[in-house]
Image: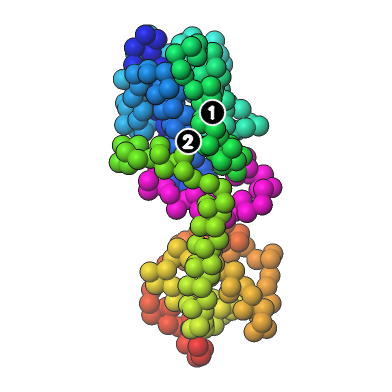
Amino acid sequence: MGGGGVSLCLSVYGLGDGVEASVQTPRSFSALFAHLFHTRHNLPSLILPFSSVPPLAFRLEMGVFGFDHRKSVLRHIPPANDYPGNIIINVNLEKSSSSVVYEYFAGKHKEINNSYGVAPCLLDSKDKGRVELILKYIEDGDLRRWSLPGIKAFNIGLGEWRSRFNCISNPYMYKQLLKLSAADLIAKGNSCVSSRQNSASKLLEKVFRVRLGRGFYGECLGVRADRNSDLSDEIGKLLSVKSAATGLSTDSATDTSEVAKAYGGGGSPSSSSFIIRMDEYNQWISGNSS
C-alpha cells in the first residue's frame, strides 16, 4: 500500500487442500475486506492476484503489509531488522489470515472520521453476522481444529466456489461473497459428499480381487476407476468395508508405499500408487471373478 497514492492489494487465489479444500481459497475474503474498506472511503485501490505482479514491481517507497497464519511461513521470514522498515509481516498462528485481515480493515475503518456519512461498520448489519460466522468456519479449517458442526462439509462446499474466487475473471466476486452463508455451504458440501459416495458405490458393483505382485504381496479388492480418479478417497473407504465383509483381513501395519516402490511408484504408508503394464495387470487379476 502506497501512502498518498493508489493502494495495491494482492491476494492469493489458490486451490484447496484436497477434499477439504481449505488452504488458500478463503483468501478471497481478505480481498473482499480490502475492497470494502477502500470503497467505503473512496480510496483508490487495485486488487490483484499475487501472481500477476512481479516481485521487482514493488517500489522502495511503498508500504507492504503481509498476513498469514501458517507455521511453515515462519522459517521464510527473516528477523525484523533484516528487511526494510516499510514491510510489516503479521503471522498469527491462533487466527486465520482472513480473520486478521478483517480485524485490520475493520480497525482502520473505525479510525477514519465518520462525519461524512460513512457506514459505522466495515460490513453492513445485514451481512455482518453471516460473514463473521463464515470466518469462524474458515478459521476452524485453516487451523485444523475441525471443531465446528459440519466443518468438513463446509470446506467441501466452499471448495466448489474455487473457480469463481478471482476478482479479475469474476467481476461479481465481492457481491457473491457477501451473499454466502455457512448453512448454504454446508448443505452444498453434504450434497457433494452424497453424490460422490453414490458414484463410488456404483463403481463397486464390479469389484474384483487383485493378487498384488501375482500374490507375493497378498490380495486386495479393486475396481476399474477409469476417468474417476477424483473419487479415490471414497472408493478406498468403501473397498475397505467391502474387504472386511468378504473375509479379507486388514493390516494397518503394512506399508503400501513399499509395494508401490517395487513397481516404480511411491506414496505414504496408507496410500500409494504405481503404474504397471497391462499384461502384468492381467496376471494379477487372472482367475478372479467379479
Q: Position of residue 202 (x, y in %)?
A: 49, 78
Depth check, front residue: 247 or 255 = 247
Q: Is residue 113 above or below residue 93?
A: above
> Judging from the image, what secondary structure is the residue with disc 2 in?
helix
Depth check, front residue: 87 or 72 = 87
Q: Is residue 123 above or below residue 203?
A: above
Mark nearer the N terminus (2 vs 1)? 2
Q: Residue at x 37, y 8 (%)?
A: 4
- Specify the quadrant that holds the N terminus: top left
Which stretch appears magenta? 138-166
| Magenta run includes residue 258 | no
Q: Give the crowd class for mark 1: few <14, some 14-19, many >=20 residues within 10 Å.
A: many
Q: Is residue 98 above or below residue 264?
A: above
- Which quadrant of the view contains residue 251? bottom right
Q: Position of residue 189 (x, y in %)?
A: 53, 57
Can the viewer see residue 192? Answer: yes
- Which quadrant of the view contains residue 217? bottom right
Label count reads 2
- Which quadrant of the view contains residue 238? bottom right
Q: CA distance from mark 2 to mark 1?
A: 8 Å
In the image, is 253 to the left or to the right of 118? right
Circles 2 and 1: CB atoms closer than 8 Å: yes
Q: Residue at x 61, y 51 (%)?
A: 151
Q: What amino acid is labelled 1 in the image?
A: Tyr
In the image, is 271 to the left or to the right of 253? left
Q: Which mark is residue 29?
A: 2
Q: What amino acid is labelled 2 in the image?
A: Phe
Residue at label 1?
102
